[in-house]
Amino acid sequence: MAVTGYSRGWIYELVWGYNHLGPESLGDQRCKNTDADPLLNDVEQAQLWQVLQQPPPDGGLWNGRKVADWMSELKGKKIGRQRGWEYLKSMKFRLRVPRPEHQESDILEQEEWKKKSASVCLENQEREPRKRRRSMVNGRTSARVETYSKTRMGG
């Protein structure tokens, strides 16, 4: 057991399979697993697509729980919210939630700040163009940068 890394029970399983089914039982059988049928067939997925075009019955935005609830009604069995989220993502939907705003925010002040910061940024770019920086390791450029520089300069 220490040599193979398998437990005693697993070794017995392998021996049983070899004795009853032959050497092909020792191979990796995972490729022979068939996929399960999808939870929603093509017609039901088209129905879901149509439903997602409308707002949810309880308002708000569609999310995994709401899609799973709709699928549960359709199928007559409980569907987990993760499966609802998977179908939502597979149909290229995403959760669109507006960013939260501070209660005391001043829109005019924010617009002034954006204009001011943009002009300062432009001034800095015009004044000093970006310099090409090399990565430094322990005060020296890396061997990759030195090699690149030598090959580019013919050295």
Image: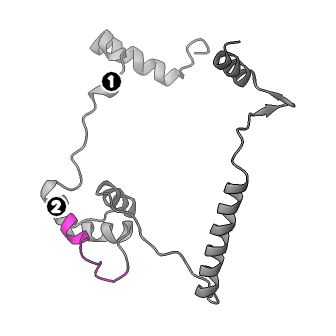
Q: Residue at x 24, y 71 (%)?
A: 53
Q: Residue at x 21, y 71 (%)?
A: 51
Whether the magenta-drawn stretch holds residue 12 is answered as no
- Number of numbered discs visible in the structure rendering: 2
- From this view, report whether residue 68 is shown above or below residue 107: above
Residue to which mark 2 is pinned: 46
Q: Residues at badges 2 and 1 in contact (C-beta under 8 Å)?
A: no
Q: Secondary structure at mark 1?
A: loop
The crowd level at tag 1 (other Cα within 10 Å; few <14, some 14-19, many 20+) is: few
User: Which is in the foreground here, disc 2 or disc 1?
Assistant: 2
Where residue 86 appears, x then y in whole percent? 35, 56
Q: Which residues are magenta?
A: 49-60
Quadrant location of residue 61?
A: bottom left
- Quadrant the N terminus occupies: top right
Quadrant location of residue 89?
A: bottom left
Residue extending furthest toward the front: 127
Note whether residue 81 is visible: yes
Q: Residue at x 49, y 24 (%)?
A: 9
User: Which numbered disc covers residue 29?
Assistant: 1
Magenta segment, prevailing SS (helix, strand or loop): loop
Query: In the image, 110: left or right of 81?
Result: right
Residue extending furthest toward the right: 139
Disc on the earlier residue, 2 or 1? 1
Note whether residue 75 is visible: no
The crowd level at tag 2 (other Cα within 10 Å; few <14, some 14-19, many 20+) is: few
Q: What amino acid type should be assigned to the residue bearing mark 2?
A: Ala
Give 135 or 154, whichever is nearer the viewer: 154
Q: Residue at x 16, y 61 (%)?
A: 46
Q: What amino acid type should be assigned to the residue bearing mark 1?
A: Gln
Where residue 25 appears, x then y in whole percent? 32, 16
- From this view, report whether residue 69 is shown above or below residue 146: below
